[in-house]
Amino acid sequence: MSVRLHEPAPITSLSSTAALTAEGVTKRYGRRLVLDTISLSVAPGERLALMGPSGSGKTTLLNCIGGVDRPDSGSIRLGADELVGLDGRSLARIRRVRVGTVFQFFHLLPTLTVSENIEISLQLVGATQEERRIRVEELLRRVGLADRADALPSELSGGEQQRVAIARALAHRPSLVLADEPTGNLDSSSGANVLGLLQEMSEASGAALVLVTHSEEAATICHRRLYLRDGRIVGPL
């Protein structure tokens, strides 16, 4: 499967509520200040690249946005829902319904087939068996893996595994997709195909995308870039 990169389509959403808003987010690990009063906003359907050197705080910020880690102070909202201060159960519910995540190392369950890995997201939100079947078949066609539905992750190439991971992240129709170096473990050809697929599917779904990347090529699928250094946003690129 080959997907060509193209210029990001303009943001056309009429929603007055941002998909993501972070205000004054601060995070320390011991004495080390990792995030220093970070503020940003992402519109519905917008794609934002977070760039910067290793240790700049990009992944920590992504983890706080996704509710995997908790900031020490500040506010993080998905739509109108404030994440900071929620108990574990409420936070997990919002993450299951509102957020999809794509990782550098795929994180597919090795004993489940391609279809079953995608279906997990739908099971977690309570979709019926028939809804799950239809959605999984649709996504397998979209990512060009309809003929690999019964394959195990170990039988797929790295690029194919990442395409499954993208399908899984978008299966439950989240409002926000978080991608942490999604091409960092792929060769250049597979990486370009994965980027094209991410762009195509985020545009089709209307989900906002926050992409952590070192790659200038990866950042080209985004509408905006923010550059982090030493836990601070030091400017757009």
Image: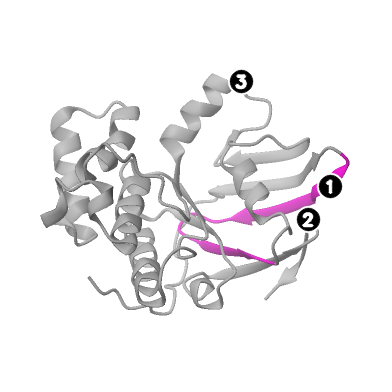
The part of the image, by quadrant, that contains residue 30 is top right
Question: Which residue is at a point 40% across and 72% down the rendered structure image?
Answer: 187
* Residue underneath mark 2: 231
Q: Amino acid at mark 2?
A: Gly
Which secondary structure class fits the magenta region best? strand
Q: Sort mark 3 into few (<14), some (14-19) or many (20+) by Cα contacts within 10 Å.
A: few
Relative placement, left or right, of 130 versus 126 is left
Residue 41 shown in magenta: yes
Q: Nearer the viewer, mark 3 or mark 1?
A: 1
Relative placement, left or right, of 232 versus 76 is right
Q: Amino acid at mark 1?
A: Leu
Relative placement, left or right, of 17 versus 150 is right
Instruction: Name the residue nearer the viewer: 47 or 101.
Output: 101
Instruction: Name the residue nearer the viewer: 125 or 143.
Output: 143
Q: Amino acid at mark 3?
A: Asp
C-alpha separation, residue under disc 1 versus residue under disc 2: 7 Å
Residue 106 shown in magenta: no
User: Are the two marked residues, 1 and 2, in contact with CB atoms closer than 8 angstroms?
Assistant: yes
- Give the percent coordinates (x, y) of residue 13: 45, 59
Mark 1 lies on a secondary structure that is strand
* Residue underneath mark 1: 33
Q: Earlier in the sequence, mark 3 or mark 1?
A: 1
Q: Which residues are magenta?
A: 31-52
Q: Quadrant of the N terminus?
A: bottom left
Q: Earlier in the sequence, mark 2 or mark 3?
A: 3
C-alpha separation, residue under disc 2 versus residue under disc 3: 26 Å
Q: Quadrant of the C terminus?
A: bottom right
* Residue underneath mark 3: 87
